[in-house]
Image (cartoon, rainbow, N blue to C red):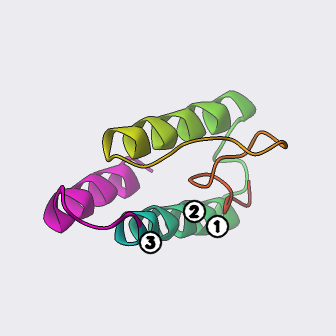
């Protein structure tokens, strides 16, 4: 799980500050897919509190990368909307 975050941070750094929002969102989508696959392999991996922390950390990272983390009426942000867990 930590590796997914490290890879995301490295990819964001490589993309650079001037990367478009679309590129950055794609990187977050890829990270979410990796987390989804981890959860598929080990469904008990993410406890409820951990899930909330992971979403919060992803949203914090997205904000630091200059992306909007506004939530929809259901309470999901664009960053975490692709999660299956």
Is there a contact, CB below 8 Å, between mark 2 and mark 1?
yes
Q: Between residues 73 and 84, which one lies in front from this camera angle?
A: 73
**Residue at left offset 45%, top offset 61%:** 28
The residue wearing badge 3 is 26
Sequence-first disc among 3 and 2: 3
Q: Is residue 52 left or right of residue 4?
A: right
Q: Distance between the residues labelled 3 and 1?
A: 23 Å
Q: Is mark 1 on a helix, strand or loop?
A: helix
Residue 52, compared with residue 37, is above or below; it is above
Magenta span: chief secondary structure: helix
Q: Give the range drawn in magenta.
A: 1-21
Residue 48, compared with residue 41, is above or below; it is above
Residue 5, compared with residue 7, is above or below; it is above
The residue wearing badge 2 is 38
- Relative image position of residue 60 (x, y in whole percent): 44, 35
Q: What element carries label 3?
A: helix
Q: Nearer the viewer, mark 3 or mark 1?
A: 3
Sequence-first disc among 3 and 1: 3
Q: How far apart are marks 2 and 1 (CA)?
A: 5 Å
Q: Between residues 42 and 65, which one lies in front from this camera angle?
A: 65
Residue 41 on the magenta segment: no
């Amino acid at each position: 799980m930590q590796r997914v975050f490290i890879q995301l941070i490295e990819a964001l750094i490589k993309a650079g500050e001037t990367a478009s929002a679309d590129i950055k969102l794609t990187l977050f989508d890829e990270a979410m897919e990796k987390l989804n696959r981890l959860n598929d392999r080990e469904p008990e991996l993410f406890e409820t509190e951990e899930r909330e922390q992971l979403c919060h950390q992803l949203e914090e990272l997205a904000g630091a990368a200059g992306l909007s983390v506004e939530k929809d009426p259901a309470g999901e942000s664009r960053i975490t909307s692709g999660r299956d867990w």
